[in-house]
Amino acid sequence: MKVKQISNIMNPLVLFDYIYYSIANFYSSVFDLDDQKRFAGLGLLSIFQSCNCITLYRHFNLENHIDIGVVNIYIFFCAVMLALNFIRYYKFISLPMLENKWQKDKLYIKLIKILFTVSYIILSVALL
């Protein structure tokens, strides 16, 4: 495997792009709702990223310094992540662009990306 391919896989934005793409394709194939697959990918990716923000919030003991409640903080992080992801995936990167990018991947590259995606999702929820 080339060094550029490995570093490209390890890039967090590429990982988030692939998670968005994977969730959208999974939602489309399981529920057969192509119109809403972008919203599902956007929403679930934002929830997982919010879990990461809450984990960091708790890790740095910011709850002792900011006293507005965990639920309010979670809603704040969800709203921020949703807004940032909306801008990224509706203004700059489209789902067809990601589909064209990853349809031609070889099997071992797809398996590595799926492994990173599943690991990210499990760790995001488990560390919360």
Image: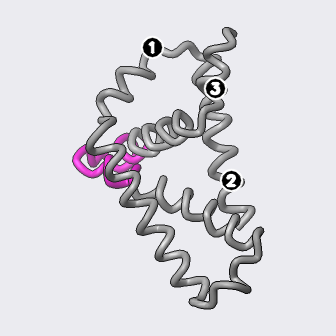
The outermost residue toward the top is 2
Query: Magenta span covers which residues?
Result: 26-42
Residue drawn at point x = 39 percent, y = 47 percent: 27
Q: What amino acid type should be assigned to the residue bearing mark 1?
A: Lys
Badges 3 and 2: C-beta atoms under 8 Å apart? Answer: no
Mark 1 crowdedness (10 Å alpha carbons): few <14, some 14-19, many ≥20: few
- Examine the structure image and report whether residue 30 is included in the region drawn in magenta: yes
Badge 3 or badge 2: first in the primary sequence = 3
Question: Height in image: 64 above or below 60?
Answer: below
Mark 1–mark 2 distance (CA, rounded to whole Å) = 27 Å
- Based on the picture, tell me whether residue 4 belongs to the magenta stretch: no
Q: Please say if the residues under marks 3 and 1 sit with CB atoms less than 8 Å apart.
A: no
Q: Which residue is under mark 2?
A: 122
Mark 1 and mark 2 lie on one chain; the one further toward the N terminus is 1
Position of 5 relative to 95 (above/below): above
Give how far across and how far down residue 48 sits, in percent: 56, 58
Kind of residue indicated by mark 2: Ile
Residue at 27% over, 51% down: 36
- Residue 54 occupies which quadrant of the picture? bottom right
The residue labelled by disc 1 is 104
Q: List the residue tagged with mark 3.
A: 111
Helix, strand or loop: magenta stretch: helix
Single out the residue that lies furthest toward the front: 65
Earlier residue among tags 3 and 1: 1
Identify which residue, 57 or 9, lies in the foreground.
Answer: 57
The span from disc 3 to disc 2 (Cα, nearest Å) is: 16 Å
Mark 3 secondary-structure assignment: helix
Tell me where residue 20 appears, x and y as whole percent: 45, 43
- Which type of secondary structure does the marked residue at label 2 adopt? helix
Mark drawn on residue 37: none
Q: Position of residue 21 (x, y in %)?
A: 43, 38
The amino acid pointed to by label 3 is: Leu
